[in-house]
Image: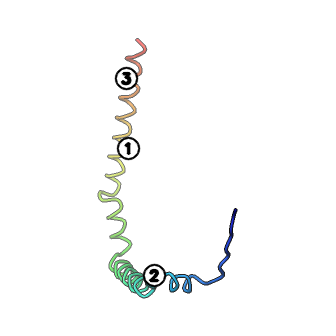
Amino acid sequence: MKVTVDIDCTPEEARTFLGLPDLRPMQDRVLKEMEDRMVANLHAMEPEALFRTWLPAGLQGLEQIQKAFWAHFTNLAAMREGESK
């Protein structure tokens, strides 16, 4: 035997019926606090400071990454060459 019950109610009505707390005021306060912090951080950061944060050493950092990749792939090629002998 199968019984199906359809209940047509809003989420607020279901929450109230089940005795669950309404977390909307707390969520609103948390989201407002997050928004305030994000806006404050955006105002504090200038484009030049952001660039320095993302690329600490500027182009030197990019060159170091390139050298590291080059050394890694050179070592891989040497290892493969040594395996084939």
Q: Which residue is mark 1?
A: 66
Q: Which residue is mark 3?
A: 79
- Circle 2 sits in a helix, a strand or a loop, which is it? loop
- Circle 3 sits in a helix, a strand or a loop, which is it? helix
Q: What is the three-letter code of the residue carrying label 1?
A: Gln
- Circle 1 sits in a helix, a strand or a loop, which is it? helix
* Dots 1, 3 in contact, CB < 8 A: no
Figure check: 81 above or below 51: above
Give the foreground label among 1 and 3: 3
Nearer to us in this view, 41 or 78: 41
Give the foreground label among 2 and 3: 2
Figure check: 12 above or below 3: below
Nearer to us in this view, 60 or 53: 53
Quarter holding the N terminus? bottom right
Q: Quote the CA–CA distance across marks 1 and 3.
A: 20 Å
> For the image shown, how many numbered marks are present on the structure?
3
Q: Residue at x 35, y 54 (%)?
A: 59
- Using residue 10 as the reference point, say whether residue 20 is left or right of it: left
Which label's residue is closer to the chain start, 1 or 3?
1
Q: Position of residue 4 (x, y in %)?
A: 68, 70
Q: Which residue is mark 2?
A: 20
Q: Position of residue 66 (x, y in %)?
A: 38, 44
Seen from this angle, which residue lies furthest bottom?
25
Which label's residue is closer to the chain start, 2 or 1?
2
The quadrant in which residue 78 appears is top left
Q: Residues within 10 Å of mark 1 (few under 14, many from 20)?
A: few
Q: What is the three-letter code of the residue carrying label 3?
A: Met
The quadrant in which residue 42 appears is bottom left
Q: Residues within 10 Å of mark 3 (few under 14, many from 20)?
A: few
Which label's residue is closer to the chain start, 2 or 3?
2
